[in-house]
Image (cartoon, helix red, strand yellow):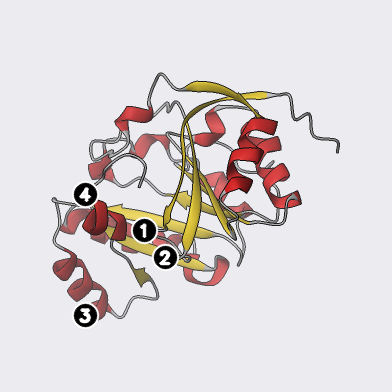
């Protein structure tokens, strides 16, 4: 399919930093943050991306990404898939030879995302205040190249997440299942202890960028 590089997206920021979570934790990565999100998770740390931003063509985005000479590119938000032109953007980044990941809320259909993209799909827990937005049909579309993430706020969130882990056999169907403590709501040590006690087949993760740059935009 020919990509129309004149197509536009509303962008919040493009920056080069260290990946703070997911399978590529710690790797230098260009982040392409799209504007807008239909969800309002109570722990959201990117509310500044809900509105505003700047219209950019795919060509402009690709040129700015290329200026960093990256190996890894992460398309994030907000919720990237809320903008239809996120799909050709992801394809164009793959065509350019980058290792591409997509961070998505799990509330929108991921079926049209380029198969070369590693889809990092959230499952919203009850304490997120958006559990009703989970699009569970997405889970059947995921494979070993993809990742599923639970942001856990409490013990009850943890038990709910354990149930979903088993209900959808996620440890076998996707490449990584990520359990992350909600920053300032659940201590990393407590979640790590629960995972070890229950011998769960998940990857514990902390949001490294919060400890490096304390959520400053552009990092």
Give how far across and how far down residue 96 sits, in percent: 73, 51
Q: Does dot 1 land on a helix, a strand or a loop?
A: loop
**Residue at numbered disc 3:** 197
Which residue lies at the image location 32% right of the left edge and 65% below the top edge?
205
The answer for how far apart the CA atoms under marks 2 and 4 are is 16 Å
- Of pointers 3 and 4, the one earlier in the residue sequence: 3
Give how far across and how far down residue 16 sits, in percent: 46, 50
**Residue at numbered disc 4:** 214
Question: Toward the viewer: 219 or 113?
Answer: 219
Which residue lies at the image location 86% right of the left edge and 38% below the top edge?
1
State whether residue 27 is above or below residue 101: below
**Residue at numbered disc 1:** 20
Q: Which mark is residue 25?
A: 2
Q: Does dot 2 land on a helix, a strand or a loop?
A: loop
The answer for how far apart the CA atoms under marks 1 and 4 are is 11 Å
Q: Residue furthest front?
A: 67
Residue 192 figure quarter: bottom left
Q: Residues within 10 Å of mark 3 (few under 14, many from 20)?
A: few
Which residue lies at the image location 32% right of the left edge and 64% below the top edge?
162
Q: Does dot 3 land on a helix, a strand or a loop?
A: helix
């Amino acid at each position: 399919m020919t990509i129309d590089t004149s197509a536009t997206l509303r962008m919040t920021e493009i920056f080069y930093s260290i990946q703070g979570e997911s399978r590529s934790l710690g790797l230098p990565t260009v982040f392409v943050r799209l504007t807008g999100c239909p969800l309002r998770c109570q722990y959201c740390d990117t509310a500044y991306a809900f509105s505003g931003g700047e219209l950019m063509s795919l060509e402009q985005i690709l040129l700015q990404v290329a200026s960093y000479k990256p190996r890894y590119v992460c398309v994030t938000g907000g919720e990237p898939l809320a903008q239809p032109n996120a799909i050709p953007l992801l394809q164009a980044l793959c065509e350019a030879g980058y290792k591409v990941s997509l961070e998505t809320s799990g509330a929108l259909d991921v079926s049209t995302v380029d198969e070369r993209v590693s889809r990092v799909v959230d499952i919203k827990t009850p304490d997120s205040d958006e559990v009703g937005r989970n699009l569970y049909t997405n889970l059947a579309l995921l494979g070993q190249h993809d990742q599923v993430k639970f942001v856990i706020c409490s013990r009850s969130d943890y038990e709910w997440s354990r149930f979903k882990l088993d209900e959808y056999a996620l440890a076998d169907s996707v490449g990584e299942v990520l359990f992350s403590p909600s920053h300032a709501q659940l201590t990393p040590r407590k979640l790590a202890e629960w995972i070890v006690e229950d011998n769960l087949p998940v990857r514990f993760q902390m949001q490294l960028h919060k400890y490096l740059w304390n959520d400053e935009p552009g990092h």
